[in-house]
Structure formats: C-alpha cells, structure tokens
C-alpha cells in the first residue's frame, strides 16, 4: 500500500510539472507576441527606447542620431566648420554630412537637380528669393542670419597695398580686376557698384541698389581688364597670386583666404545690402533639427563669436 501511494504521488507530481510547463509556455507565447507588436511599432517610427526619451535640444528624440546636410554659400566655409563642431559638442546626437560650399546660384541649381539638403544658406536675398519661388525651401523658416561688406583687395605686400582704391579709378581702366560671375552674389554686388560709375551697364540702365548685377556688359574701358571667377574664393585667389591688380570680394574672404589686403571698402549705398538668408529645405527629413540649428546660429553667444572672428556681422532684423 505504501508503494502504491508513492507511485501515485510520483505520477501526480509529473502531471503537475507538465501542466506548469504548459502554462509557462502559454505565458511566454503571449509575451513574445506583445514584444513582436512593440518591435513592429518601433520599426515604423524608431525604437521604443528612443520614443520613451525626451526631446533633445535639436528637436529630435534625445540620443537618436541626426545627420544634417547643409548647402552653404562659399564664403561661409571656414566659419561654418567651426560652428558645426561647436554645435555637435553641445548636441552630441547631431552631426553634419559633407557640407556643400558653392556659389549661391549653383546651390539652387543643385537643389533643382534633386540633390538632398536639410538647410540652404545663400549669400544674397535674391538667390533665396529664387529658392522660395522654386519651392526649394520652407519660406516660413527663412531668416536673415548675417551681413557682410564688399571690399577692394590686392596682393598682400604688393604695390597697391597702401592705395585707397575708388570705383572711379577702376572705371577709368587704371587696374586689372577680378569679380565673380553671374552665379556668384559677390559678383552681382560688384557689378551693381560698378554700374554707379558707368563701368557696368545693365540692359535696362538700372544702377546701384536698383540693379541686379546680371545680364549686363562691362564698359569699353574695363571689359578687357576683367577676369571672372566661378567662386568668390577664386576671385580672391586671382588677387593673391597677382594675376590681377584688384579683386572685389567680401570682408570675410580676407579672413578665410589670406594672402590679400584690403585697399578700401566699397560704399554700401552703391549696391544692395549684403545679407545671408538661411532656411530649412522643403525636402528636409529632419526639419525640426534643421530649424533648431539655424536658430542656434543666430542666438548662441559662443557661435556669434565664431561668425565675427571670420568677418561676419550678425543681422539685426
């Protein structure tokens, strides 16, 4: 009788263990199904871990990596590199792709050809107006970020280094000159200034700030003395090497290029105001992060020092 009881107890124990394992398996199956649903949801909008974190400074979930692609005017090259490094130090989840520095008109052409960017920063109001009209940027995000000055430069240590050059001197054909081509805002500003002394003639006869600096011709006294550059940096280089006597570039180009010295500042009232508008592109996949970066560029005190060190002034409007 005692043996029978033990056998019965053993059988009962085995039955209970099988049942327990069955229940555990069911419970594990439900949990796996729930986990699978969570994974499916995460696949549609980022990991669940990222979703539970708070928003970071760049407007994206904290810890979620964001890479911003910027198209910027050529004259911003060195200042922008430093600004991006500082921003990533402050916002470790935000990095920057291979920032493209080109003439502003070329940047618009790149966007028109389907190249991707999150942010566009041009060196003139006109080129940003063109971007807005073409639908390349979100106009609601547009802001004027910086201002600059147009100057005559010559080779550092050259014969003209201490010469106070005027527009009238250039119009008389006294010097060889380099300016940017029609795709380069600095070239447009230069032609606007030259138009005030008859050295550049627009089709409609407009001059100064009323002119576009495009579609015209240089005067007979100047046309054989002008070398055009595809980038403002190239224009500056022509003066540095002595290929031309003078170049018309931005103050900031003197800081970033070196090798040239300023002869004189071109009067502000001879050309349109030199401004740098920035905007988030219409195609941006990280619009909030892009907008946060632009705002930071205009408001962060340490960043402001970077722009100023490279020859830019912060816009006041």
Image (tube, helix red, strand yellow):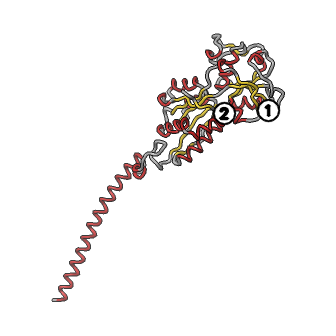
Which residue sits at x=67%, y=32%? 252
In this view, 11 is above or below 150: below
Count the labels in the image. 2
Q: Percent from the top left, x then y, of residue 258? A: 74, 35
- Secondary element at image label 1: loop
What residue does disc 1 label? 156
In this view, 286 is above or below 190: below
- Packing grade of label 2 (10 A; few <14, some 14-19, many >=20) is some
Asked whether 104 or 29 is in front, the reply is: 104
Q: Is residue 293 left or right of residue 44?
A: right
- 3D distance between C-alphas at marks 2 and 1: 18 Å
State yes or no: discs 2 and 1 in contact (Cβ < 8 Å): no
Q: Percent from the top left, x then y, of residue 152? A: 73, 25
Query: Which numbered dot is residue 311?
Result: 2
Q: Which quarter shows the N terminus?
A: bottom left
Q: Quadrant of residue 173?
A: top right
- Secondary element at image label 2: loop
Q: Percent from the top left, x then y, of residue 255? A: 70, 35
Which residue sits at x=52%, y=31%? 279
Q: Which quarter shows the C terminus?
A: top right
- Packing grade of label 1 (10 A; few <14, some 14-19, many >=20) is some
Asked whether 219 or 272 is in front, the reply is: 272
Task: Identify the residue at the far top of this view.
Answer: 205
Q: Earlier in the sequence, mark 2 or mark 1?
A: 1
Q: Percent from the top left, x then y, of residue 50? A: 43, 50
Q: Is residue 213 visible?
A: no
Query: Which numbered dot is residue 35?
Result: none
Q: Is residue 73 visible?
A: yes
Asked whether 212 or 107 is in front, the reply is: 212
Which residue sits at x=46%, y=44%? 60
In this view, 145 is above or below 289: above
């Amino acid at each position: 009788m005692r043996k029978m009881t033990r056998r019965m107890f053993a059988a009962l124990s085995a039955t209970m263990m099988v049942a327990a394992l069955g229940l555990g398996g069911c419970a594990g199956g439900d949990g796996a199904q729930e986990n699978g649903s969570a994974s499916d949801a995460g696949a549609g909008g980022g990991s669940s871990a990222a979703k539970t974190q708070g928003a970071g400074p760049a407007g994206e979930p904290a810890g979620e990596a964001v890479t911003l692609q910027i198209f910027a005017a050529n004259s911003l090259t060195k200042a922008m590199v430093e600004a991006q490094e500082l921003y990533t130090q402050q916002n470790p989840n935000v990095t920057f792709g291979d920032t493209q520095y080109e003439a502003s008109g070329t940047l618009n052409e790149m966007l028109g050809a389907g190249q991707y960017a999150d942010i566009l920063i041009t060196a003139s109001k006109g080129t940003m107006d063109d971007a807005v009209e073409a639908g390349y940027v979100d106009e609601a995000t547009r802001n004027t970020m910086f201002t600059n000055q147009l100057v005559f430069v010559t080779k550092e240590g050259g014969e003209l280094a201490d010469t106070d050059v005027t527009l009238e001197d250039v119009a008389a054909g006294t010097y060889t000159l380099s300016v940017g081509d029609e795709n380069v805002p600095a070239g447009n500003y230069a032609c606007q200034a030259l138009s005030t002394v008859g050295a550049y003639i627009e089709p409609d006869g407009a001059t100064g700030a009323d002119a576009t600096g495009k579609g015209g011709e240089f005067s007979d006294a100047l046309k054989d003395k002008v070398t055009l550059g595809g980038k403002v940096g190239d224009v500056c280089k022509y003066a540095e090497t002595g290929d031309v006597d003078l170049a018309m570039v931005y103050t900031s180009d003197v800081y970033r290029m070196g090798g040239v010295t300023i002869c004189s500042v071109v009067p502000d009232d001879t050309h349109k105001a030199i401004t740098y508008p920035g905007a988030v592109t219409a195609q941006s996949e990280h619009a909030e992060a892009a907008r946060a970066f632009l705002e930071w560029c205009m408001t962060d005190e340490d960043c402001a020092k970077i722009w100023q060190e490279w020859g830019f002034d912060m816009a006041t409007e």
